[in-house]
Amino acid sequence: MSVSVAARIARRELRGGIRGFRVFLLCLALGVAAIAAVGSVRVSIQDGLNREGAVILGGDGMMQFTYRYADADEKVWMVANSEAYSEIVDFRSMAVVDRAEGPPDRGLTQIKAVDNRYPLKGRVLLEPDIPLSRALDGTNGLPGAVMQQVLIDRLGLSVGDTFRLGTQDFVLSAALTREPDRAGGGFGLGPRTIVRTKDLANSSLLGSGTLFETEYRLSLPEDTDLAALETEAETLFRDKGMRWRDSRNGAPGIARFVDRMGAFLVLVGLAGLAVGGVGVSAAVRAYLDAKTPVIATLKTLGAEGRTIFAAYMLQIGVLTTLGVAAGLLLGAIIPLALAPLIESRLPIPAAFGVHAAPLAEAALYGVLTAVVFTLWPLARTEQVRAAELFRDTTSRKLRLPSTRYLVALGIALVALVGSAIGLSGIPQLASGSVGGIVGALVILMLAAWGIRVLSRRIASARFVRGRSALRLALGAIGGPGNEATSVVLSLGLGLSVLAAVGQIDSNLRTSIAEELPKDAPSYFFVDIQNDQIDSFLERTQNDPGVSRVESAPMLRGIITRINGRPAREVAGDHWVLRGDRGVTYSAAPPLNTTITEGAWWPEDHSGPNQISFADEEARELGLTLGDELTVNILGRDIVGTVTSFRVVDFSTAGIGFILSMNPGALAGAPHTHIATVYADEDAEAALLRDVAGAAPNITAIRVRDAIDRVTEALSGLAAATSYGALATLVTGFVVLIGAAAAGERGRVFEAAVLKTLGATRGRILTSFALRSALLGAAAGGVAIFAGGLAGWAVMTFVMEASYRFEPVSAIAIVFGGALATLLAGLGFALRPLALRPAGVLRARE
Amino acid sequence: MTDAPVLSLRDVALRLDGNAGPVDILHEITLDIARGDTVGLVGPSGSGKSSLLMLMGGLERATGGSVMALGHDLTKLDEDALARFRRNHMGVVFQSFHLIPTMTALENVATPLELAGADDAFDRAEAELEAVGLGARTDHYPAQMSGGEQQRVALARAAAPRPEILLADEPTGNLDGATGEAIMDLLFGLRDRHGATLVLVTHAPELAARCDRVVRLRDGRIEAPEQASQEAAE
């Protein structure tokens, strides 16, 4: 075989233009563009996070403590190792605005109390544009504060008005428009207010046991070895509850989220590419079918199968390069064009630009997809026989391509799946998704085959006789040709992805919006001081509108050691060990507690400390009864033995503590109480007023608002996923149009013959419409099954929640599928109907 | 060995799978064609003429018997080996020309020479087109040429590699009388020039009359010579 001869044949063949390859190019370009765009945005954000790590963190390094300030040793270390440090106190409270008439307005706010050095990095932007220090200086003897606009609006404040935090009045100096270190913080339940720490001295907030966090941001010399400094800080202070972060990963939460979300969207993009692959395969098949006489002629002239394969592979290779290049161009340009829009919606700076790595990844997927989906039809060129020139051999038996092509196909498939799993960074989800895509393709292929067989059977059944439009439609679906398979595969896969997203989204919403509130309390009250708990319980329990009140002492601690060894060494990076956790104490088990193993301590227990641990988490950590845990609370190590496991259900939004101890272990430590109140909506306002009036330091968190915040975050996720699924569907629609266009020639002939036999245009159109609608509905039906299956798998295994079939989105998908196919089909039915039969039939002679 | 037939068919049968079940196309065909012979295959439509030609060219595989061409049993060769055999020894002309639409006349003619590895493929192709009177149309695509011109390109393409065997399937079937005659003159001229063996399927008696020998087919069988001559007399 001569490659140069094959190349020359390929070059000459390509002179015919790429008209027949519009669908091929579009499918490949769309899929590659989607993946490249998602990857580019992901890398842009990651680069932004890396570049601005110190600004996002608020310093080059940071030491965090839970409800305590750094002690003298820790401060000495900070002074010795940094050029400067700034102290931040972060906690929740209620902002209160008194009204001349009526009850005061209250709003939950996340307070950041700062010193004069804040911010060490970056700039706080205010409206009006004044320096933060001037804003916090205040006026008329009152300290100043700045607040996010959303809270200003909620409380009906204007700049210059006063409001209260605890028992301290503040004057609102400006609206907070940009907080440089906003992304570095965690998930806040309320909008931000910034004040000076010293101005809170008379607020009665930050009392002993109050839930607050302190952060010490360090400005470090340029040549600091961050890793070495981290090791030193952790060795010295970790056991006292210190947590270290530095500019190498300024916003780990966001970085992780962007990484996961990006990877997930790339997987959705891969589904799009798979749909595109169906189109690519159909386009190559159609092209090669049309080239059968040329191939047969070349064989007659003495071309070997390998020469012909090489000639057409080179053509497809050139087209693949074009398609992938177009996709990369689009994928690089789209994020740049949308950069201002994306940036305005991100809490972090992103470094938009052309990034090579995501483009290379998208190109790899594009090329491998093209190979996987074109190798089979290409290999079949070897089976074209010279005899095709003499007789139509469309009825020839389907033979498998030769072994070398099957092996090559297998290698390409493994490479594609392997890179998807390897490059995603979320191998389990990637394996599941790739498995899902392959599974859906197999189900769809079987379905397409089944639909064709069934249509053929029904078309010859007695009951369709006389219903010529239906019979013709069924005959066409079941007859020779690949249109039915193409439509079911492409549309079906696109709709399956959309159906899966729809099922997961509605299930998540249902579980949040419907199931949770049934058991959830109306309010959480936190920071109830020891001397306030009795009056609080008296007020709430005697309210006829309150059905239930639960309260518990609340401390926060870090599990540092298990049986004397560092906890992470023993149990790995489990979420329970990652930061501080709520810890409580109780003489008797709370009502309705289920002990799964061991026994609760006697009510008058005064011996060594005992611990009751959450059953599920204990198993995940590998704990057994008798294990000794060291918990660091307020810098003090408290050691206890695990004597029981109990069921803790976090899904009810009630009080649930991973770790509970006997009162003797903790009662001496400064602490506050947490309470949940289950109240009628009518009773809520008065209850809140009374509690806040009596104890301004207590913070009330409305559960409904918190759920709304979570739902909002989930809506954003669902929207991003839906856009990804939509890209898949658009590709599916392109494939659909391609399939309809490819079938047009056949329909022209069919319409001409039917007209000759006396069929009206209306009847022919009805038959064409029925054919499209039946195929679309079939694709939709399969999509519901495949999407439902995927939805069930994700809800059951990933979300660990219950799954319920959601019929509304499912019906919309079947309807949408039928409509899309109908539109595409009818779009290509008009020309066949308009042509005169004589011309068509003569041309066919 | 020089007297050995160029084409030798023994008890050849061809059965094809149709949509309505298997169909017997040819039965017990035994036929020898000597080097340099000009043989006309004639018979009514559906008698199996084109199928017999396909078997001779290795374009179709016999389901029974043997087809020897230049000492090679075509029934034993795989598709690639058949392609190589044609490249080196055969030229085929079709009723529907089967030019490659994306190639110019020159490229169409040069293709078999390129496939055979000829360095001077294009020079020879140009000379061949000159010989069929299309020296001025070398850069034209098939769609830009008349039926007669396309068939001349096809003739040039078939003759360019100097094949020992020329097979032609109703080469004038799609052409008007005058053009058809001109094509036949060319075909016989090429045969005479290169000394190839020519097997020709035709419906035209005057064309068959130009052949050294006529083989008649009916219902997939070769008619006995006496029966054939009786029919011819009738």
Image (spheres, rainbow, N blue to C red):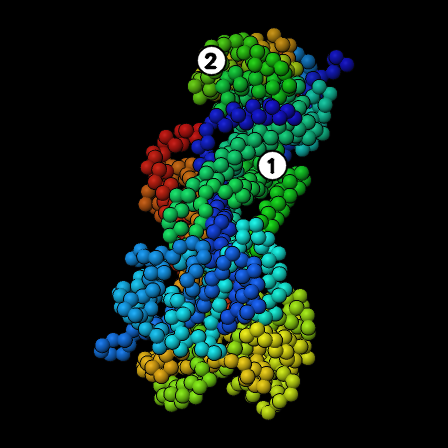
Which residue is at a point 49% across and 49% down the rendered structure image?
A51
Q: Secondary structure at mark 2?
A: helix
Residue beneath disc 2: B137
Left or right of A760? Residue A741 is right
Q: Where on the picture, by quarter, is residue A77?
A: bottom right
Vertical arrangement, residue A619 with respect to residue A159, above or below? below
Numbered disc 1: what chain? Answer: A
Q: Amino acid at mark 1?
A: Ala
Report how many numbered discs are placed on residues in the image.
Answer: 2
Residue A11 seen in the figure:
yes
Residue beneath disc 1: A379
The N terminus of chain B, quarter of image: top right
Which residue is at a point 43% across and 41% down the rendered structure image?
A333
Q: Are marks 1 and 2 on the same chain?
A: no
Q: Residues within 10 Å of mark 2 (few under 14, many from 20)?
A: some
Give the numbered dot on residue A826.
none
Which residue is at a point 52% across and 44% down the rendered structure image?
A358
Q: Secondary structure at mark 1?
A: helix
Q: Amino acid at mark 2?
A: Arg
Residue A317 picture location, percent across and down: 55, 34
Numbered disc 2: what chain? Answer: B
